[in-house]
Image: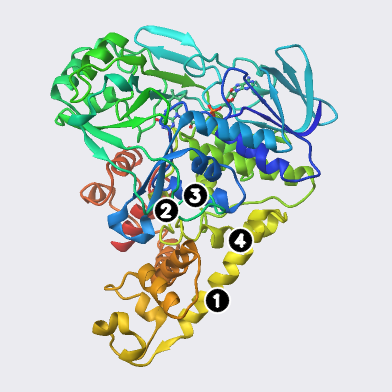
């Protein structure tokens, strides 16, 4: 029971950390987790990916991480988000079967070199020889050189359902109140955070015929590099309905029973996943909100009503649910609830996610004040790979925000103190046109070189990159001379142009064109490669321009700004305006330093000088 690396917690952060650490054959890696919480479980909505997050899943997959593979093994509905907005900002979102996802996670862990230990960690302390000693609930001890804590919402977790408050990390699981020896020396955030979940509904009691069906998107792609382009598994539909005034009035009439508003919950919730109570009171003039009915699995008899997370008492939940079209006879299987928990002060972590004052101690996931499976998984990877590299006395792997959403996430976390749960979205990046799903393999190449393992993903990536380089250089060099050479687009042919120039034209779909041209010349590349090359060629000019914008940003740092004027612009978000009003920055530099100000806002303000 002596390990190089131990991970506490088998959630999305923990499994990713243990998985990558165990890819280093020299290391002995253990994962300790509560026996009653499935590995890789999805306590909130059973979906992976989405705007900004799909990019992270592809980055992890290109790095040899787990999440994309697990999502593919359990995916039951695929959607391309932002499809109408063009290739650069599209993201994949996969609805997963929650039981299959957890099963796939367990199978992966069991098939790896990770030692899985089902137990509760009651205490952790650091020994004089530099190792960590973990005290378990069965009175046994574990020792480890590096320790990664990924305890999610469990640290001093408290569950709220109406007036009932119980200790717990989530439904039917106890909280984690131990580890006090080590945690007493770790600085936690001064605020507690909170998250919530909607009631789960009995599928047999829902009338889907009055809801709008949302079918799976057949053009969406698998996440995992080794899986074919097209989706093969059985698909389910989701359904759209609406919560309306009659339901919102019930919520508004019961304000004093809401733990969110009667003072019972002190924790701060995620701004971008507001509870239905939040929506009812924040938007008094809105009388309708979407509710997406998402099946939790192929054989699961429960439905997740996305958009109405709540901690009101069960009878109030039932009352407002039954006013929603399609849910008139709905029965609740598990009532909605909220959880409050402690989070670590991430400004004390370095870019490898190591806690600065305790050598060898790493934190990753929701315990760092983030929200979401993908954010947790990305941090798990960063902590896991760096703990492994440190144990092997090798240089650390630091992700840059210029070429990865993982880098954006980590830099945002470690350079600020959170005042609310952090969620990743594309506007957090200055480089959105470059940080796409399609080019994740290219972007992760330099990091894989540092990891330097000869895994199957590395072999796949090398081939992909070689073919990508070949395709791009052909597109740059191949010049069409006449209409005859270019029959498919004869009507728009303007004279000698390179394939790259044609791909950049507004009236041409770059992916379709490159695919057609490759076929014409008898060369067959994988669809994901064609997409990557075509979109990279198309946006190369924009990316140069965007880099120039960034350079301009750094030059205007000391310019004075009129913060009141900024509140008048419609393209500055409500959140940013709130923060500007709070801080009242006088210079552009001060604006840049405000937590939560989006890079897109900075670019816009710089453009007004
Ligand atoms: C009620 C609820 C609502 C949520 N709502 C949302 C939402 O709206 N949007 C969203 O994006 N995300 C939501 N989430 C968050 C999402 O579940 C997390 O972001 C994600 O699961 C975090 O992953 P993690 O690995 O950090 O932690 P978790 O998945 O929570 O995993 C923590 C692991 O640590 C283990 N553990 C804890 N203490 C100990 C100990 N002492 N000994 C051994 N093992 C221990 C547990 O067994 C568990 O496996 C919600 C979570 C909950 C519980």
Question: Would you call the spot at circle 1 few (<14 residues within 10 Å), some (14-19), or many (20 or more)?
Answer: few
Q: Which residue is mark 3?
A: 223
Asked whether the viewer can see residue 289, the reply is yes
In primary-sequence order, the first of circles 3 and 4 is 3
Left or right: 455, with 289 as reference point: right
Question: Would you call the spot at circle 4 few (<14 residues within 10 Å), some (14-19), or many (20 or more)?
Answer: many
The residue tagged with tag 2: helix, strand or loop?
Answer: helix
Q: Which residue is mark 2?
A: 589
Asked whether the viewer can see residue 363, the reply is no
Q: CA distance from mark 1 to mark 3?
A: 24 Å
Of the numbered discs in the image, which one, if any, rests on residue 470?
1
Asked if marks 1 and 3 touch (Cβ < 8 Å), the reply is no
In primary-sequence order, the first of circles 2 and 3 is 3
Quarter of the image with the C terminus is bottom left
Q: Is mark 4 within 8 Å of ligand 1?
A: no
Q: Is mark 1 within 8 Å of ligand 1?
A: no
Quarter of the image with the N terminus is top right
Q: Residue at x 26, y 50 (%)?
A: 566
Asked if marks 2 and 3 touch (Cβ < 8 Å), the reply is no
Q: Which residue is mark 4?
A: 461
């Amino acid at each position: 029971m002596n390990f190089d690396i131990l991970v506490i917690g088998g959630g999305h952060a923990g499994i990713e950390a243990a998985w990558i650490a165990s890819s280093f054959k020299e290391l002995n890696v253990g994962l300790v987790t509560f026996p009653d919480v499935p590995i890789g479980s999805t306590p909130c909505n059973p979906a992976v990916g989405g705007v900004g997050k799909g990019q992270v899943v592809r980055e992890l997959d290109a790095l040899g991480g787990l999440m994309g593979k697990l999502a593919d093994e359990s995916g039951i509905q695929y959607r391309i988000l932002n499809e109408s907005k063009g290739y650069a900002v599209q993201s994949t979102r996969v609805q997963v079967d929650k039981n299959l996802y957890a099963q796939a996670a367990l199978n992966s862990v069991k098939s790896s070199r990770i030692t899985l230990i089902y137990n509760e960690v009651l205490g952790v302390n650091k020994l004089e020889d530099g190792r960590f000693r973990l005290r378990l609930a069965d009175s046994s001890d574990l020792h480890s050189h590096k320790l990664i804590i990924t305890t999610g919402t469990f640290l001093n977790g408290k569950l709220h359902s109406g007036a009932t408050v119980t200790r717990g990390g989530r439904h039917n699981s106890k909280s984690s109140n131990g580890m006090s020896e080590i945690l007493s020396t770790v600085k936690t955030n001064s605020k507690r955070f909170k998250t919530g979940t909607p009631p789960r509904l009995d599928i047999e009691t829902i009338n889907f015929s009055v809801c709008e069906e949302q079918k799976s998107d057949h053009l969406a792609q698998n996440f995992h590099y080794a899986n074919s382009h097209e989706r093969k598994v059985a698909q389910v539909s989701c359904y759209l309905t609406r919560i309306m005034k009659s339901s919102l009035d019930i919520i508004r009439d019961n304000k004093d029973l809401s733990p969110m508003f009667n003072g019972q919950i002190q924790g701060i919730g995620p701004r971008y996943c507001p509870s239905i109570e939040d929506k009812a009171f924040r938007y008094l003039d809105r009388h309708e909100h979407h509710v997406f009915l998402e099946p939790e699995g192929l054989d699961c008899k429960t439905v997740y009503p996305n958009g109405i997370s709540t901690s009101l008492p069960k009878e109030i939940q039932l009352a407002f649910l039954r006013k929603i079209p399609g849910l008139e006879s709905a029965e609740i299987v598990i009532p909605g609830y909220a959880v409050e928990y402690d989070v670590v002060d991430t400004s004390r972590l370095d870019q490898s996610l190591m806690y600065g004052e305790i050598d060898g101690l790493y934190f990753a996931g929701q315990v760092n004040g983030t929200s979401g499976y993908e954010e947790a998984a990305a941090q798990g990877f960063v902590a896991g790979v760096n703990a492994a590299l440190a144990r092997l006395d090798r240089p650390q792997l630091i992700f840059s925000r210029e070429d990865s959403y993982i880098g954006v996430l980590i830099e945002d976390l470690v350079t600020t103190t959170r005042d609310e749960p952090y969620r990743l979205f594309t506007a957090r990046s200055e480089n959105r046109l470059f940080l796409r799903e399609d080019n994740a393999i290219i972007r992760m190449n330099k990091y894989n070189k540092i990891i330097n393992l000869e895994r199957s993903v590395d072999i796949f990536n090398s081939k992909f990159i070689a073919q990508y380089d070949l395709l791009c250089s052909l597109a740059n060099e191949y010049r069409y001379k006449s209409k005859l050479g270019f029959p498919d687009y004869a009507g728009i042919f303007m004279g000698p142009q390179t394939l790259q120039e044609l791909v950049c034209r507004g009236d041409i779909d770059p992916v379709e064109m490159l695919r057609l041209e490759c076929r014409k010349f008898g060369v067959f590349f994988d669809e994901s490669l064609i997409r990557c090359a075509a979109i990279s060629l198309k946006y190369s000019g924009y990316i140069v321009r965007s880099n120039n914008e960034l350079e301009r940003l750094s030059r205007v740092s000391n310019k004075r700004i009129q913060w009141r004027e900024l509140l008048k612009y419609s393209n500055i978000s409500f959140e940013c305006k709130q923060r500007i009003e709070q801080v009242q920055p006088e210079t552009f530099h001060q604006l840049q330093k405000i937590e939560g100000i989006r890079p897109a806002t900075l670019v816009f303000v710089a453009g007004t000088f």
